[in-house]
Image: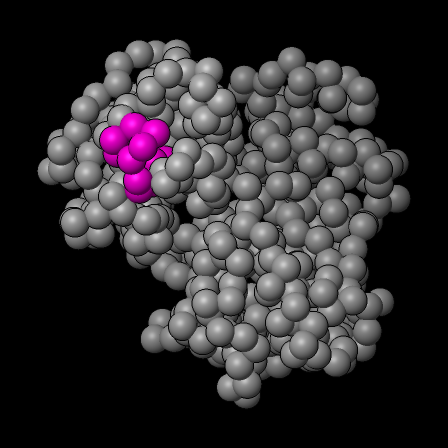
Amino acid sequence: MLRRGGSASTLRRSRTSNLLLHSFPYRWDVTECAGAREKILIYGLGRSGRGVARFLAREGVRAEWHDAHPTAEDEALMQELGFLRGDPGGTYRTVVAAPGVPIDHADLLALSAGGAEIIGEVTLAARLRPHLPLVGVTGTAGKGGTTVLIAHLLRAQGLSALEGGNIDPPLLDVVDQAEVAVVELSSFQLERVPGLRLPVAVITNLGVDHLDRHRTVEAYHAAKLNITAGQEAEDVLVVPAGLEVRTRAQLRPFQPERLSLADGRELLPVADLPEGIHPANAAAAVLAAEALLTRLGRPVEPERLAAGLRSARPVAGRFETVARIGNVRFIEDSIATRTLAVEAALTRAVPPIAWLVGGRDKGADLVPLRAAAQGRVRRVIAFGEDGEKLARALGLPFETVPGTDGDTVMQAATRAGLEALGGPGGAGTVLLAPIGTSFDLFRDYKARGASFTRAARALVAGEVRA
C-alpha cells in the first residue's frame, strides 16, 4: 500500500553513485499490493495508462482499470495482463490517473472524497524507484527536443540514460533499463507530482498554452513551476536567462547564442550544430547534463559533450526536413500547436514559406505569429476544422483546402504549398506548423505528420503531379 514512511526529508542513496535523493513521504508496499489488500485503479488507458498497467503487472501488482472509451487494443492488453474493469464509483486506496484527465474531473473528485489518493505516472515511478535519478524537463516549447538531447549527451559521457514521459516511450517503460531517466513533463503531468524532488530540472521557456484546461495563464505557469517545488539548495534548475523563478535550487541560466558550461567555457559555436537542433535546446541540455554529471560525481568531459552535440539528431516530427524538390524543402513540425513553437518554426524556416495551417483551434495567441510571418510567408494553406478561421485571423494571403479525409486533405494542402512556391522549379519552404490540434482529421499529431511526410515524398517521387 502507499504507507507513510517518514517525512519528505528522509534520504536515500542512489545506486548510480553517491547521489542522495529525498524519498517521498509515502512508500509503496508491493507485497500488500500483490496480496490484494491495496485497491488500485488505473484511470485512463492512453499511452500513459497502458505504461502504468504494464509496469504494475511486472511488479506483480493487480489493478483495476477504467476508460470511458477504451480501444480494442486497450481491452486486449488489460485482458492479457489479467486486470479487471473497475468502477469509478467504487472505493480505492490509490488512483493513477492519466495526464489527460483534468484534476477536477467529477470521477476523480468523488474518488478522492472516498479516500483515494490521486497520483500520476511520474509520482508512481519516483516512489517505486526512489534510487533512480530523474532529470525533469518542461516548458511551453522545446521540451521534447531538450529531453532527447540531454539523454544523448549523458550517453556521450558514458552513462546509460534513456528519455521518456510525455515523449515516447512512457516513463515507466524505461525506469528499469537505465542508470538515469530524462523525463519530459507536461503541465498536465505536473499537476500530480506531490513531493517530487528532482536533482536537475529544466524549464525551456514559459508561454501560453492549454488554457482550455488550466483556464488562466497563471494557473498554467503554476503547474509548470511545480517542477521545482520540491527542489532543495543542492539541486539545479536550468532556465532561460532573464526568466524569474522562485526556487530553492541553484539557478543555471542559459543563452541560446552560446553553448557553454556553467563556468563559461564554450563547447562549440552555435553554427556547428547539426541541422534541426535548436540552439536554445542545446544550450539548456549542456547545462543540465553538466549539472547531473557533477551531482553524480562523474567527470565532465567537454570534448565528449561537444562530440555529443555534433552527433545529435532532431526528434522526428519536430521541425524535420522530410523531403526536398530542387530548392524547395518540406518541413514537418506537426507538433507545433503552441505559439512559441510555431513562432520558432516560422523564424527558422527558409523563406518564402508556404505555411500549412489548420486543425482544431485551441485558442493560441496569434499576435506574435503575425509578426513572425511578415515578409516570410508567401501564402497560408488552410485545412481542417478551423484552418480558414485561423488563416483569416492571421490576416495573410491564404487559400483553403476542403475535405474531411485526412490523407486526401494533406495531399492537396502539400501540393498547394508547392504550387505557391512556384512548383518543383521554385524555392523556399513548405512548412507544416499547423497551430491547431490534429484531432479533427487524425488520431494524433504523429499521424498528421506522417500523412504530410507521405504527401511530400510522393511529390518528390512524381506520384502526385504538382
Q: Is residue 270 above or below residue 434?
A: below
Q: Which residues are magenta?
A: 421-433
- Rendering coords of residue 112 (x, y %): 55, 40
Report whether 174 appears left or right of 368: right
Report whether 379 appears left or right of 140: left
Question: Going 35% across and 53% down the picture, which residue do you hit?
Answer: 348
Residue closest to the eye, 334 or 88:
334
The reply to whether residue 217 is in sight is yes
Quick one: quadrant of the C terminus? top left
- Rendering coords of residue 35 (x, y %): 88, 36
Look at the image and say whether residue 432 sits in the magenta stretch.
yes
Question: Going 42% across and 69% down the picture, which residue do you hit?
Answer: 256
Q: Is residue 151 above or below residue 462?
A: below
- Rendering coords of residue 117 (x, y %): 61, 44
User: What colouring method underlies this structural image?
Assistant: one colour
Q: Is residue 293 above or below residue 450?
A: below
Question: Going 73% across and 22% down the picture, which residue do you hit?
Answer: 78
